[in-house]
Amino acid sequence: MVQINPSILLVDDEVPFVETMAKRLAKRDLTVDTAFGGREALKKLDSGGPSTIDVVILDVKMPGMDGLETLAAIKSAHPNVEVIMLTGHATVESAIEGMKGGAYDYLMKPCEMDLLMSKVNEAVDKKRAHEAKILDARVRMHALRRES
Ligand SMILES: [Mg+2]
């Protein structure tokens, strides 16, 4: 099976932060897309098909649709996509709420790249293992139907 590069959607309202992080992540062999707010992120997820984006890195504090609202919308429309929340000291509780709402994990800003990369890789592995299980279940279901 061809293992394609993990695909990341980075969502944060701070434009310079997004640009710097996107460059750093791309250097580490990730396919990176960006959004500067929750609605833009959802549009990108909706238009990309179910398996295009593996992991969303999501800022907690954003004007308009905040990180928790965005997380809820992502998890409802794209339950297999893993989400890592990014937070400052003031919003750690929101990040923990996010984990209760299905986020894979959270990281404090400014983020340490090695730590972020290890969490991204873990989240990608989790998503792909889950997708493989679903595929396997489908194959078994078809095999059962052929027998009957
Ligand atoms: Mg922000």
Image (cartoon, rainbow, N blue to C red):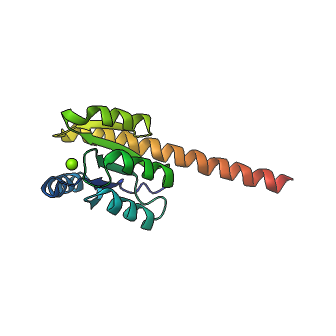
The answer to whether 60 is drawn above or below residue 92 in the figure is below
Position of 137 compared to 66: left or right?
right
Q: How far from the left and from the top, in percent, is residue 108?
A: 22, 36
Q: How far from the left and from the top, in percent, is residue 3?
A: 42, 54
Q: How far from the left and from the top, in percent, is residue 63?
A: 25, 53
Res 85 → quadrant = top left
Q: Which residue lies most toward the front here? A: 64
Which of the pair 51/34 is nearer the observer?
34
Q: Give me the residue at 21% from left, 55% from top.
A: 13
Position of 128 compared to 41: left or right?
right
Position of 85 compared to 99: left or right?
left
Which of the pair 39/32 is nearer the observer?
39
Q: Which residue lies most toward the bottom here? A: 47
Res 34 → quadrant = bottom left
Which of the pair 4/43 is nearer the observer?
43
Q: Which residue lies most toward the right here? A: 148
Q: How many numbered discs, if any?
A: 0
Which of the pair 129/3 is nearer the observer?
129
Q: How far from the left and from the top, in percent, is residue 87?
A: 24, 39
Res 22 → quadrant = bottom left
Q: Give me the residue at 30% from left, 38% from top.
A: 118
Q: Give me the residue at 39% from left, 65% from top.
A: 43
Q: Give me the residue at 68% from left, 52% from top.
A: 139
